Image: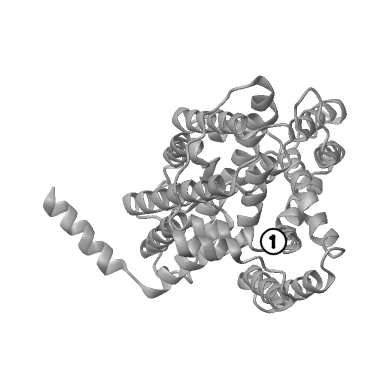
């Protein structure tokens, strides 16, 4: 046993490379700067306190860090996980659900993800949900964040327009770092304008930089399960795990000679979510966009040595989770317009891709449009949120309008 561990350690040292370590850093940088604002909005929407928000960052950092390290080391593949960005958007738009009820919904979602992984039914389930409807539901959820970015111009025109200009220039000249540029430009402008509220950050740095996990006792209600748990499960599986699997396969890490343990990975993220949900780890899943960074030739020319990028990302995620108090105070110091603009601009690409996928299949286009509009409307009936009704409306419309000889495209087809 000791000899085997020694051999594994020697192999790890031999496989270390600066490029893979940097790739891991970029994974975390892009992951945090692009969507952490949405996670904060999600926590605030269900009534989380600043201390509980710090706990959310701790739980998510611990979950992503431990899963990236363990899975990448064990399978020698760059397996990178993330929090569910569309899930955070769903939580942020939920209405009438408190933190305890939301925690119960997180646990139900985690149980469903674990079951989907352990049973091996994930791929079959994906084939039953039309790609057009899943994309339309995601686009509808994220639409208000995109609109919010431009609505924030009213509150802080100079700052938001500056961030928009940096975003456009970034997309043109340094696409991988455009979100970072938007964040930096917004912070600099806010500092020069005197709109940064740094008191909370100073207190966090003075007293403690470490995040403290806070337990939230879950409450299970039918309304929260239907309006939050089930849609959270659906958007996480269809909009995060499915693209994550696609990224793994596109990079060549799921071949006949060396298949990727997809079911095991999904079950692992579900199991970790079950453990961390009471502390704010609402949903963990496979990464797609950031995973592509760690799986790219830029991480290392040799695909067998790119797993170091996953390990590197995991270590940095662990550290960012531990200093969640500072991260929480940092974002609390930002003006609301900055957070709104950052979240909306970071999601423009996701919104555009989701809309494109939603209308790509002509046979399902009108049904997808119905699903998109219902979801974007914020409709709430019987305490159940718009994401669920958008999916139901789209499925009903699809069943009525679809021709028998034109089956809709489904995820994975």
Q: Which residue is mark 1?
A: 346
Identify which residue is drawn at 37% across, 53% down. 69
In the picture, measured across the screen, residue 248 lies left or right of residue 192, that is left
Quadrant of res 87: top right
In the picture, measured across the screen, residue 407 lies left or right of residue 16, that is right
Q: Residue 155: x and y, percent?
A: 84, 63
Quadrant of res 390: top right
Identify which residue is drawn at 56% across, 44% down. 241
Q: Residue 68: x and y, percent?
A: 42, 52
Q: Residue 401: x and y, percent?
A: 87, 30
Please count the marks in the image: 1
Q: Nearer the viewer, residue 353 or 154?
A: 154
Q: Residue 144: x and y, percent?
A: 80, 50
The vertical placement of 198 against 88, above or below, is below
Q: Nearer the viewer, residue 91 or 198?
A: 198
Identify which residue is drawn at 75% across, 27% down. 384
Res. 118 visible in picture: yes
Quadrant of res 196: bottom right
Q: Quadrant of the C terminus?
A: top right
Res. 413 visible in picture: no
In the picture, measured across the screen, residue 376 lies left or right of residue 12, that is right
The vertical placement of 54 against 271, above or below, is below
In the picture, measured across the screen, residue 227 lies left or right of residue 77, that is right
Q: Nearer the viewer, residue 388 or 182?
A: 182
Kindly give the residue lying farthest to the top in the view shown: 222
Q: Secondary structure at mark 1?
A: helix
Q: Nearer the viewer, residue 368 or 389?
A: 389
């Amino acid at each position: 046993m000791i000899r085997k561990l020694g051999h594994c350690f020697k192999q790890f040292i031999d496989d270390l490379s600066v490029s893979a370590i940097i790739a891991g850093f970029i994974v975390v940088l892009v992951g945090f700067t692009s969507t952490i604002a949405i996670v904060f909005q999600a926590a605030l929407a269900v009534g989380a306190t600043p201390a509980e928000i710090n706990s959310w960052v701790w739980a998510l950092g611990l979950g992503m860090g431990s899963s990236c390290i363990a899975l990448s080391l064990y399978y020698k593949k760059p397996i990178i996980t993330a929090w569910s960005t569309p899930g955070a958007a769903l939580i942020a738009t939920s209405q009438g659900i408190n933190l305890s009820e939301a925690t119960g919904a997180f646990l139900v979602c985690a149980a469903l993800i674990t079951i989907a992984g352990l049973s091996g039914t994930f791929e079959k389930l994906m084939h039953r949900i039309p790609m057009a409807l899943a994309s339309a539901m995601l686009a509808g959820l994220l639409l208000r964040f995109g609109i919010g970015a431009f609505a924030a111009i009213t509150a802080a025109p100079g700052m938001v327009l500056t961030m928009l200009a940096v975003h456009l220039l970034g997309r043109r000249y340094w696409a991988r770092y455009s979100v970072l540029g938007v964040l930096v430009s917004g912070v600099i402008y806010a500092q020069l304008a005197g709109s940064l509220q740094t008191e909370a950050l100073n207190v966090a740095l003075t007293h403690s930089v470490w995040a403290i996990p806070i337990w939230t006792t879950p409450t299970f209600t039918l309304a929260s399960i239907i309006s939050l748990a089930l849609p959270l499960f659906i958007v996480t599986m269809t909009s995060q795990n499915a693209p994550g699997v696609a990224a793994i396969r596109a990079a060549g890490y799921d071949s006949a000679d060396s298949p990727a343990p997809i079911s095991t990975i999904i079950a692992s993220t579900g199991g970790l979510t079950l453990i961390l949900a009471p502390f704010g780890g609402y949903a963990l899943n496979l990464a797609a966009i950031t995973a592509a960074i760690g799986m790219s030739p830029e991480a290392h020319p040799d695909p067998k040595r790119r797993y170091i990028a996953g390990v590197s990302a995991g270590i940095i995620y662990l550290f960012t989770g531990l200093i969640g108090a500072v991260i929480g105070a940092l974002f609390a110091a930002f003006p609301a317009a900055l957070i709104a603009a950052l979240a909306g601009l970071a999601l423009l690409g996701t919104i555009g891709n989701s809309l494109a996928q939603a209308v790509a299949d002509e046979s399902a286009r009108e049904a997808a449009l119905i699903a998109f509009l219902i979801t974007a409307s914020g409709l709430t009936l019987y305490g159940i949120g718009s994401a669920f009704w958008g999916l139901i409306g789209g499925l009903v419309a699809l069943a009525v309008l679809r021709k028998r000889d034109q089956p809709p495209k489904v995820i994975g087809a």
